[in-house]
Image (spheres, helix red, strand yellow):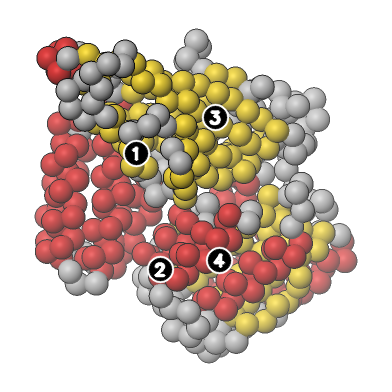
Amino acid sequence: MSASPLHLHVEGDQMLVAREAPTHRVVEVVITAPEHAQQTRQRIPLNLALVLDRSGSMSGDKLHYVKQAALYLVETLEEADQLAFVVYDDQVDVLSPGLPLTPAHRQHLAHAIRQVESRGYTNLSGGWLAGCELAAKAATTAHLNRVLLLTDGLANVGIRDPEELAHHARELARRGISTSTFGVGLDFNEHLLERMATEGDGNFHFIEAPQDIPNIFAREFKELITITAREVELTVDLPKGVTVNVCGGWRYTLEDGRLRLAVGALAAKRAQELYLEVTTPPDAEAKDLTLTFLVRARDETNGVLEARAERTFTYASQDEVAAEAVNQDLLARFAKVALADASLEALRLEREGRRHEARSSILSRFSQVRPAMDAQTRTEYEQFVQRIEEGLAEDERKRLSQQRHVERRRREVGSPEPGKTSSAR
């Protein structure tokens, strides 16, 4: 058992919906992971596949610091953890399958890492898929499975289409193999790596300077070893006639009035915010309408965590709905996620030289959520629209892509307010 429960809190921007016409509501769902189980101090064992780009452009400082980061993993992982190692240029070489970190395996990995040299082109898909295959072969129900992909260049051999690679990342995540991506320098495709990380239930990192590589690898690792809830899934039962739009780029299915949304893994006490745009149907007879929420996850010892909540909307006249107080703080939080979503699409279009479409894309969402935005966010996005029109430099586009990736997946530290939570059962 975990030392503290999984928490689920659900809130809407308003409580009333109209009898006479469809009503749009924003629903905020906050899932907070448990603390570590203090009595056992046991963490989830890791099953990692490290996939490193060794193409010619990685020569010099990049490869030097990548090796440092890889050696950090080898030295820091525990014996119960597993690590596979793949390097690629236009050829893919498996230097080690996923094996426990015994002294002999550590020594083998350290030697293999030190021998890596740069050469060739960039078969990103081949290297990554080889790492995914190794992670899948070594996976158990007890492990957290993740592939760590680092590259500094464009995929120019193998699969190069971002949509196809994102599809593979999504399917692998469904099988329990997540992906975090690390883009080094200014020559990689930030849209591709961000999509792979988002669809793959992982993190996207932009590494501007080679000397930052070890620290950013360490940051990813420190998050992994503090995870207390994995395979987190939110289920929402929607009454007949209710439609929903999921913000944040989350992987989900919607069938027969049931929404299933995959959240991935959460570190201890981390609160994951999710935003649903819900449209309720008009109904002259009904008194209210209830959405039912269930979140399930697995803890450090592979036990099941579960929490439930409901959100009931009351039917009223359009005049009463218009007069009801609005939760402006909730709408301000939602606005940032909605705009981050739209920004990533605008950045993709701008990267392709389609600036007019990029501007129209972001302005459409901006106009919808503008009333809920605080002054600072409004100014920031007004400047963003201007920069989209002018065209972005590579470093600016990549920094913005990482920033928006983080903003669309809002995660805060802390627990929901007392009295507003539903605990694990």
Q: Mark 1: which amino acid?
A: Val
Let me know if residue 170 appears in the view: yes
Query: Residue 165 location in percent, x, y?
Result: 47, 69
Which residue corresponds to mark 2?
163
Q: CA distance from mark 1 to mark 3?
A: 16 Å
Q: Mark 3: which amino acid?
A: Leu
Look at the numbered disc 2 and give the secondary structure of its residue: helix
**Which is closer to the viewer, label 1 or label 4?**
1
Which residue corresponds to mark 4?
149
User: Mark 1 or mark 4: which comes first in sequence?
Assistant: 4
On the rendered structure, is 166 left or right of 142? left
Q: CA distance from mark 1 to mark 4?
A: 33 Å
Furthest-top residue in this view:
419
Look at the numbered disc 4 and give the secondary structure of its residue: strand
Q: CA distance from mark 3 to mark 4?
A: 33 Å
Instruction: Find residue 49 and report its image quarter.
Output: bottom right
Instruction: Find residue 379 and report its image quarter.
Output: top left
Look at the numbered disc 3 and give the secondary structure of its residue: strand
Which residue corresponds to mark 1?
244
On the rendered structure, is 312 left or right of 258? left
**Which is closer to the viewer, label 2 or label 3?**
3
* Mark 4 neighbour class, 10 Å CA radius: few under 14, some 14 to 19, many 20 or more: many
User: Mark 4 or mark 2: which comes first in sequence?
Assistant: 4
Q: Quadrant of the C terminus?
A: top right
* Mark 1 neighbour class, 10 Å CA radius: few under 14, some 14 to 19, many 20 or more: some
Q: Quadrant of the N terminus?
A: top right
| CB atoms of marks 1 and 3 within 8 Å | no
